[in-house]
Image (cartoon, helix red, strand yellow):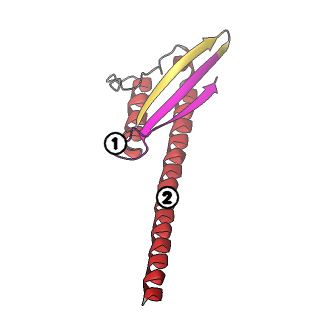
């Protein structure tokens, strides 16, 4: 009878270990998927910036984190509004920001995307992806 109890104990410890392993694998897979989405969204905005190069060089694409989406009908404002909507729809708690830095003839853009990595923000697990591109 003691052998059966020891066997059940060893088996239950093993099953708990396997369940933890599977839970961690799913969590890490989800985080990887979210990071891939953030990378694709950053590249999407860099393409939008390149398609409006003159406006971009004037700083028209600047947008602070948490600021309301632009309400103007101007093409650049429409691009920013659409992109912010995609960030919010594709990532949990997704927010974006764009910063223009001018260094002489070089115009750099920092595209930052934040999202809630654990989906409930209970642990403050906020992830960020920063992308730097230049014209």
Residue at image x 32%, y 25%? 68
- List the residue tagged with mark 2: 24
Classify residue 98 as left or right of residue 104: left
Quadrant of the drawing holding the N terminus: bottom left
Please identify the quadrant where the C terminus is shown: top right
Most foreground residue, 113 or 9: 9
The Cα–Cα distance between marks 2 and 1, rounded to whole angstroms, is 18 Å
Q: Residues within 10 Å of mark 2 (few under 14, many from 20)?
A: few
User: Could you say where residue 54 lies in the image, as x and y percent from the top left?
Assistant: 56, 18
Range shown magenta: 107-135
Residue 85 on image: x %, y % = 37, 37
Which residue is the extreme one toward the right?
105
- Establish if 92 lies above or below 62: below
Horizontal and vertical percent for residue 16?
A: 45, 69
State the residue position of label 1. Answer: 122
Q: Is residue 111 magenta?
A: yes
Q: Is residue 39 above or below residue 75?
A: below
């Amino acid at each position: 009878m003691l052998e059966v109890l020891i066997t059940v104990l060893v088996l239950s410890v093993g099953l708990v270990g396997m369940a933890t392993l599977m839970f961690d694998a799913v969590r890490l897979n989800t985080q990887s998927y979210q990071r891939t989405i953030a990378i694709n969204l950053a590249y999407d905005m860099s393409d939008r910036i390149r398609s409006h190069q003159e406006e971009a060089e004037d700083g028209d694409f600047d947008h602070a984190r948490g600021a309301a989406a632009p309400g103007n009908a101007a093409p650049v404002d429409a691009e920013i509004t659409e992109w912010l909507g995609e960030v919010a729809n594709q990532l949990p708690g997704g927010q974006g920001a764009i910063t223009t830095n001018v260094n002489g003839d070089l115009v750099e853009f920092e595209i930052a995307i934040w999202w809630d990595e654990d989906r409930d923000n209970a642990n403050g697990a906020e992830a960020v992806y920063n992308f730097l591109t230049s014209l």
